[in-house]
Amino acid sequence: MAWRDDKARTTLIREAAGSMQPGKTPRAFAELLFDHSNIEDLANYDAASLAFLAEQAWEHVQRRTAGSADIRVINPMMPDGREISVLEVLNDNMPFLFDSTMAELAEQGIEVTLVAHPIIAVERDEQGNSCVSTVSRCQRGQEASAKA
């Protein structure tokens, strides 16, 4: 069963990456963003919706200044017509910040239906545009900070 779930998750993420608008957001970003999300979370979204969420997150990444935290809450209309609330937190890698944020949301009675918690190394070119590179789970503990 777990193998099928993993295959379904991988297929959905690849479909989402393939649905990205060419030239707007790197396909690899969608794959990195959702790569460790649970299939139970992802199953509530189709590929177009995940691509839309990745594009929104990429726009946020583009505006972040290195060394600062950037938090935003948006209420986008999804491609399937649903309006959802999205909390995006961009920061240098800080142990336990994710757990603390999730605990606070639970304490406030906020149900979280999709969690994407990648640790991504971001580098910028001379024009300030983001270039994403992979940080695997094995390397995560060694990564001091995401450079965004």
Image: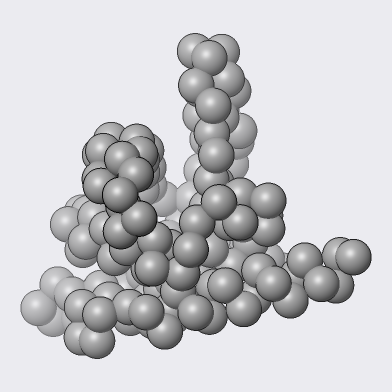
**Residue 124, image x and y in percent?**
24, 74
Residue sitting nearer the eye, 79 or 127: 79
In this rendering, the answer to whether 63 lies above or below 90 is below
Q: Residue at x 64, y 75 (%)?
A: 10
Q: Nearer the viewer, residue 6 or 130?
A: 6
Task: Give the left or right position of residue 102, taking residue 88 as reference.
Answer: right
Q: Residue at x 9, y 78 (%)?
A: 127
The residue shown at (58%, 56%) is 42
Question: Residue lying furthest front in this view?
Answer: 81
Quadrant of the image occupied by residue 98: top right
Q: How is the image coloured?
A: one colour
Q: Position of residue 45 (x, y in %)?
A: 50, 56
Locate the C terminus by quadrant: bottom left
Find residue 105 and report its horizontal and vertical position in percent.
51, 22
Residue most toward the top?
Answer: 108
Does residue 124 sit above or below 93 in this rendering?
Answer: below
Number of numbered markers: 0
Drawn side of residue 126 relative to residue 51, left or right: left
Between 64 and 10, the one nearer to me in the picture: 10
Position of residue 113 measured from the top left corner of the image (x, y, whole percent): 55, 39
The answer to whether 120 is drawn above or below residue 77 in the figure is below
Mark yes or no: residue 144 visible.
no
> Farthest residue toward the right?
1
**Picture quarter containing residue 17?**
bottom left
62 shown above or below 16: above
- The quadrant in which the N terminus is found is bottom right
Q: Is residue 32 left or right of residue 40?
A: left
Residue at image point 53% right, 14% down: 109
Q: Is residue 113 visible?
A: yes
